[in-house]
């Protein structure tokens, strides 16, 4: 009995560690948004607009291509791209500006966070590049405070859908 328990613990530790290292391998570092960078979805110059920006990494067509970064002028444009099933299955990493740490008018590329772990405020009065956008936060308390001040509701990554983008 003791051996079974010990074996089970060792097995789950090994499986857990291998899953974690796979996840760590797919996390990318943010790529700075340059003044000439255009939004992958709409083609607008990203740095010309306020509000949170996003970037995602998509698997290359061949292994030699490596992952390709796609930059977006707003979280709304990123989600419009990502929610398409053809795109969703090829995305490895998604990063968004953490508006808990960056001013709305000048998001700082030093404050990108994992979009899948972020909290989003939908329906606020704050505008991004394409009008209303999803404000992204690392801390739910900051998202709640933002929603109280600017309106909207707080949701997590898995709750974002096309209706959230309206």
Image (cartoon, grey):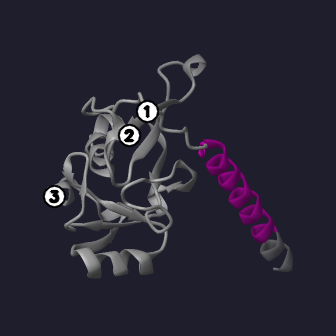
Residue 72 appears in view: no
Instruction: State the extent of the magenta-drawn residues as a range.
Output: 7-28
x, y percent for residue 159: 30, 64
Residue behind mark 2: 47
Q: Secondary structure at mark 2?
A: helix
Nearer to the camera, 79 or 19: 79
Per the image, the residue denoted by label 3 is 163
Image marks 2 and 1: residues in contact by CB distance under 8 Å = yes
Q: Residue at x 36, y 81 (%)?
A: 145
The residue positioned 38% from the left and 74% from the top of the image is: 143
Q: Nearer the viewer, residue 34 or 4?
A: 34
The total of numbered circles placed on residues is 3
Dot 1: element: loop
Label 1, on which residue? 35
| Of the image marks 3 and 1, the number of the one nearer the N terminus | 1
Residue 145 has which mark?
none
- How many neighbours does mark 2 have within 10 angstroms: few (below 14), some (14-19), or many (20 or more)? many
Q: Position of residue 28 (x, y in %)?
A: 60, 42
Q: Nearer the viewer, mark 3 or mark 1?
A: 1
Residue at (55, 19) in percent of width and height = 65
Q: Nearer the viewer, mark 2 or mark 3?
A: 2
Which x, y percent locates residue 106? 42, 53
Please tell me which of labels 2 and 3 falls first in the chain: 2
**In the picture, which quadrant includes the C terminus?**
bottom left
Residue drawn 33% across and 31% down?
40
């Amino acid at each position: 009995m003791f051996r079974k328990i010990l074996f089970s613990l060792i097995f789950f530790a090994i499986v857990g560690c291998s899953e974690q290292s796979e996840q760590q391998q797919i996390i990318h570092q943010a790529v700075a948004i340059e003044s000439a960078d255009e939004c992958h979805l709409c083609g607008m110059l990203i740095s010309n607009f306020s509000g949170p920006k996003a970037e995602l990494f998509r698997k290359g067509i061949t292994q030699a291509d490596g992952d390709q970064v796609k930059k977006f002028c707003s979280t709304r444009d990123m989600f419009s791209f990502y929610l398409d099933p053809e795109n969703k299955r090829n995305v490895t990493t998604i990063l968004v500006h953490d508006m808990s740490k960056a001013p709305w008018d000048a998001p700082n590329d030093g404050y990108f966070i994992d979009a899948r772990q972020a909290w989003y405020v939908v329906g606020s009065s704050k505008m991004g590049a394409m009008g209303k956008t999803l404000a992204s936060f690392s801390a739910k308390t900051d998202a709640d405070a933002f929603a109280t001040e600017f309106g909207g509701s707080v949701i997590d990554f898995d709750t974002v859908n096309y209706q959230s983008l309206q």
